[in-house]
Amino acid sequence: MKAEQRVMANPTDLINAAAEQFISVARMAIAKRGVFYVALAGGSTPKGLYQMLATSPYTTQIDWARVHLFFGDERCVLSTHDDSNFKMASEAMIDAISIPEENVHRMPTELEPVDVATAYATTMVEVLGEQPLDLVLLGLGPDGHIASLFPDTPALDVMDRMTTALYVEKFDSWRVTMTYSVINAARQVIVFIAGDAKAEIVKDITTDAVVGLPIQRLAPTGDYYWYMDTAAAGQ
């Protein structure tokens, strides 16, 4: 399934549109099922979204007591480390909204990477049951990676688990990521692509100049959107 491309004039307009979409999806899920399950992403554009959601009037437009926050991927560092996606999301949004602590499901990165993946999959099963995530937010790396599904890593082929640990050689670090099986099953997936530094990879993946990249292997069964600014879509 190809993504519906939504191109905004600049990053601010992109974040505004994403905030409206986030709220719409959350309110619809809560109205239909009484709960909203979302997987957050790391990165500067998602951070801008979180900061906006934590401000008026957005913060009062969602019943945060009915929201469960997950993380699509995480670096294997302590939750207080500056590289932690959980720390970023906490400072940008979580600390400013009225969400129960037990509804925020961080990856237990104080454990060994493989144990983090196992523990997080268990948490997801306990919370979600048979339900898919309502929304998965993703960024796009200049190498075509999404979440921590990097090119030429074994994580790309893990289909029988919800999460997996992987060592990313170019960053000399361990990460844990949700797998394609979880992301593709979500009711909605949004990929954020902003800035002229992403124009080359957008051109490559939309013209098939390069094939087999992680973003190209993404095949959501639900609604699938790319939220881009004109700089990223320029080529």
Image: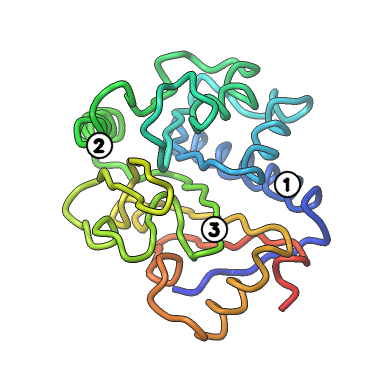
Instruction: Give residue 112's position: percent from left, percent from top.
Output: 23, 29
Q: Which residue is drawn at 41% across and 22% down?
A: 78
Q: What residue is drawn where x is 66% and y is 46%?
A: 45
Q: Do the residues labelled 1 and 3 touch (CB within 8 Å)?
A: no
Residue at label 1? 15
Residue at point 52%, 35% (across, down) = 31
Mark sitting earlier along the chain (2/1): 1
* Residue at numbered disc 3: 140
In-front residue for pair 101/25:
101
**Based on the displayed image, in which of its 4 quarters is residue 3 positioned?**
bottom right
Q: Eyeballing the image, is 148 above or below 101?
A: below
Label 1 crowd bin: few (<14), some (14–19), many (20+), radius 10 Å: many
In the image, which is nearer the foreground, mark 2 or mark 1?
A: 2
- Label 2: which residue? 117
Q: Work out whether mark 2 precedes mark 3 in sequence or the reverse, and give the earlier one.
A: 2
Kindly report the distance in space between the C-alpha atoms of the residues bearing marks 2 and 3.
Answer: 22 Å
Disc 1 marks which amino acid?
Ile
Count up the numbered dots. 3
Secondary structure of residue under mark 2: helix
Between residue 90 and residue 27, name the one nearer to us: 90
Image-quadrant location for residue 10? bottom right
Three-letter code for the amino acid on which mark 2 is drawn = Ala
